[in-house]
Image (tube, helix red, strand yellow):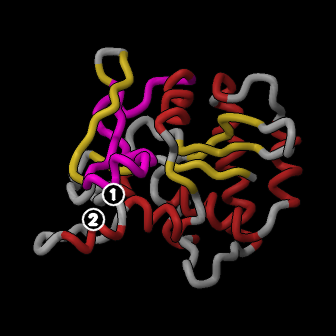
């Protein structure tokens, strides 16, 4: 979204113009990337978006604003929800150089990053992808060939001070570990939102 249409995070509401711009971006991306959602039609997605609450539209706009390029990557036939996932080729630029969570952020004595992946996702109203969801996304395309993305870390690993992240190299999806307090310019996180 353009800078002039950036939304105040305190309002969590889009103006009519911002909503129209967001819908235009989402529709264009949906039609360009049919491989991500074969069998689904934009008119059904748009109808669902029109019914959804303002908070979810704001969350989608935040995914867009931070470089996630959200697109529909699934549909839950039981609930009728569409699953939007960050589909940018590389980990979203506006969400890089973050450690894993608040505890990790507070444990750093110096050179702290500005935020953590878990806190940022919560502020945006989205969920970090799990390892399984990340692998499902990779079945739809090739993502994170130069970057990496934090994924939701199992509690047993986190309790020991670690966190996990994924990327794609050599046409293979890899899962790695780091101390949760670490952060890198080429590591961000991907999220999902059910609408």
Q: Is residue 142 left or right of residue 72?
A: left
Measuring from the top left, give residue 14's x and y in whole percent. 69, 73
Reply above or below: 21 against 92.
Answer: below
Query: Which picture quadrant has residue 16?
Result: bottom right
Q: Is residue 147 left or right of residue 184?
A: right
Q: Secondary structure at mark 1?
A: loop
Measuring from the top left, give residue 69's x and y in whole percent. 54, 46
Local crowd size for mark 2, using a 10 Å CA cut-off: few (<14), some (14–19), many (≥20):
many
Q: Is residue 47 left or right of residue 73?
A: right
Which residues are the magenta region?
A: 140-168
Question: Which label is found at residue 164?
Answer: none
Query: Which picture quadrant has residue 115?
Result: bottom left
Q: Secondary structure at mark 2?
A: helix
Which residue does the image show at 49% across and 61% down from the upper left? 121
Q: Residue furthest top?
A: 171
Marks 2/1: CA distance?
6 Å
Measuring from the top left, give residue 129's x and y in whole percent. 51, 44
**Residue 164 colored in magenta in the image:** yes
Measuring from the top left, give residue 135's x and y in whole percent. 49, 28
Which residue does the image show at 21% across and 51% down from the upper left? 179
Query: Are the residues at dot 2 and dot 1 in contact (C-beta closer than 8 Å)?
Result: yes
Asked whether 104 or 26 is in front, the reply is 104
Reply above or below: 87 against 8.
Answer: above
Question: Which label is found at residue 100?
Answer: 1
Which residue does the image show at 77% across and 36% down from the upper left? 75
Asked whether 171 or 163 is in front, the reply is 163
Which residue does the image show at 64% across and 39% down from the upper left? 29
Residue corresponding to mark 2: 104
């Amino acid at each position: 979204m353009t800078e002039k249409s950036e939304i105040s995070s305190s309002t969590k509401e889009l103006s009519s113009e911002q909503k129209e711009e967001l819908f235009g971006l989402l529709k264009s991306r949906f039609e360009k990337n049919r491989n991500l959602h074969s069998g689904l039609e934009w008119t059904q997605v748009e109808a669902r978006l029109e019914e959804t609450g303002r908070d979810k539209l704001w969350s989608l706009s935040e995914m867009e604003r931070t470089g996630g390029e959200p697109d529909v990557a699934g549909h839950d036939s039981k609930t009728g929800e569409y699953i939007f996932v960050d589909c940018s080729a590389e980990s979203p630029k506006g969400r890089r150089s973050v450690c894993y969570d608040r505890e990790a952020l507070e444990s750093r004595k110096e050179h702290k990053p500005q935020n953590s992946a878990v806190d940022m996702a919560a502020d945006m109203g989205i969920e970090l992808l799990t390892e399984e969801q990340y692998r499902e996304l990779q079945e739809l395309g090739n993502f994170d060939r130069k970057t990496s993305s934090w994924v939701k870390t199992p509690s047993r690993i986190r309790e020991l001070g670690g966190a996990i992240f994924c990327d794609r190299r050599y046409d293979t999806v890899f899962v790695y570990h780091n101390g949760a307090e670490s952060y890198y310019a080429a590591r961000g996180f991907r999220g999902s939102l059910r609408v």
